[in-house]
Image: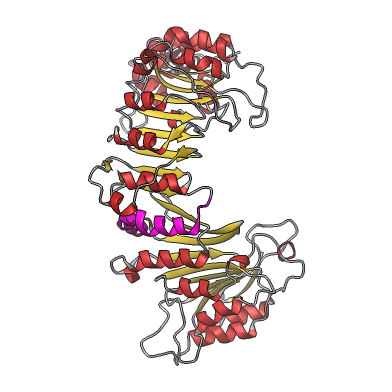
Amino acid sequence: MYTASPELTDGQQQPGTRSVDPHNRSFPISELPSELLSLVLLYSLPIFDPMESCWEYDECQPYMAALFGLRYVSTLWRDLIDSTPSFWMIVSSTWSPKAIKMVLRRSGTCPLAVHHILYNDAHNGGDADEATPSRTFLQLVNPYRSRWTSVIIELPRELVAEFFDTPLPRLDTLKISLTDEEDAVQPVIPLTPDMIDGLYSLEHVYFNHLPLQWNDVFGRLNRLKTLSLSMLHNITAEQIIEAISLNPTLETITLASLEAEVQHQPVDWALSNPTRASLPRLRLFSAEVKLDLLDAILQNIQIPHDIREIIIIPSPPSSRENNQQFWTKTMSPLFPTLHRMHKTTGGSSISLKEKGTAICTWTTVGESDDGFELCIDNWGHTPALDWIASVVNGWESPEELPGFKFLTSSGSIGFSTTFAALQTIPRMTSIDIAINSKNSHLWVFLEALGGATPKGPPSFPFLQSLRIRRWGLGFAKFIEVLKRRYTNHQPKGWRPRSNLQLDFTTRRPAWFEDPSPVIIHLEKAEELRELDGVESVRLGCLKGQPGMLAVVWNEEDGQLAWG
């Protein structure tokens, strides 16, 4: 049922006869020409980008919900939308056969985006009774294959060859996956030469959990802008490198969970290899694969210096020897790129954690998509920090760069060598650490903050923010540390570059963080706030809890405020 629009007035029926106020600059949208109104409505709809999809059953729902919402506004809009093919360019198996036929009819001769993801109770809510089965869906949409421009499809093994059997002359985007979720190696799905030749027009591909004849497939793809591979078992590093080399127009490379056979080459030879693939248009390189595969790929391609995003997450962790070779040698051509990204995004952060192995993550902190994320696993926290320090100190004027942020938990800072390595990284402006009440290594850090000896200068001269979660110690020594840091008796020529913002907030109330927490009294908070060099003090928890009373310091009035 559709709601009818109100009756039009005489003035609306004859817009040319009514008087117009020359000072009124507004223009009724109902009087726009149909072509212009349809464009306004079309651009108001959510964008459906096939390569941004996440293999979700109901990915087309936001677009269709918004489209039918516009249809309900008035009869004029409904009739305009129903008669304009460009509104009906998405067809999904999540709809009933009747709805699919209606969309195909209304789409006219426009390009089609075909979406078929099987319903899975474990990952998708709602009712799948209206969904169309795979074979039925293909039978409905196959007559329109000449209009397919993008396909997101999940198929059982027996239908994959049938899918490739008929040419797709206008297809430029293909995301295809087997429905089988087992990780076991699958037999290769045979494709005829005619089937493979039908892939020539592809510009964006995503192959997931799909056993194909990769030499033949990659040999036919030479116009790619996007190459995404995941969950592939019958592939080699050489085949991946060949696919990249044959497509110098690549803008995006995404690799994840690939069980690829690797034949190593000497790193020194590879870095000077004149045949390394040049990728001048590459803007995103993301790899979450085994380190030996990642090592082989980076040895054979040239990542441009103006790339916008780099994500490198070796998984699972490699040996410490391989880590050292990869990060110090294979990654060395990217050091200038990391420098540029750190500078343009406003800094970067370094985090340490224990998750079976010692993990160090170095990532940019900007709000834009530009930047890098590097995950150093199973090398040890100290060697990883030493490597970051060596990279940063090799940059031009490192002390003039945007600042670094450091985050860690108590289990990750048990050794003084970790702090020693951290101190060699210039422009550390923010430190966030979680300390439990029994961790004596806290004082290793605090002594470095205030100066380990009366004659030694304090560390981290650029520090602006210090957050200590799960505080469980007294304040007498901490106050002495801060007094020593900001006293006039520091070594000649040394002084902190900015005042310090102290933060003792936790994510949850103290009794959730620690069974026997140490409550910070307001008198101590006031004493900290009055110290020279302390700009502000924050207490409490970040997330509000029912029945809790917040106490904050009002900087304008110079007193406590209750809320």
- Is 244 positioned to the left or the right of 553 in the image? left
Question: Can residue 24 be spotted in the picture?
Answer: no
Q: Is residue 351 magenta?
A: no
Question: What secondary structure do most residues of the magenta stretch adopt?
Answer: helix
At a point 32% along the width and 44% down the height, the residue shown is 300
Question: Can residue 310 be spotted in the picture?
Answer: yes
Query: Residue 182: which quarter of the image?
Result: top right
Q: How is the image coloured?
A: secondary structure
- Is 279 positioned to the left or the right of 390 in the image? left
Q: Is residue 338 magenta?
A: yes
| Quadrant holding the N terminus | top right
Near-viewer residue (561 or 54): 54
- Give the number of marks: 0
At a point 51% along the width and 80% down the height, the residue shown is 448
Near-viewer residue (294 or 310): 294
Q: Is residue 312 above or below residue 119?
A: below
Query: Residue 130: which quarter of the image?
Result: top right
Residue 551 x/y as whole percent: 66, 68
Residue 341 x/y as whole percent: 35, 55
Residue 76 x/y as whole percent: 46, 15
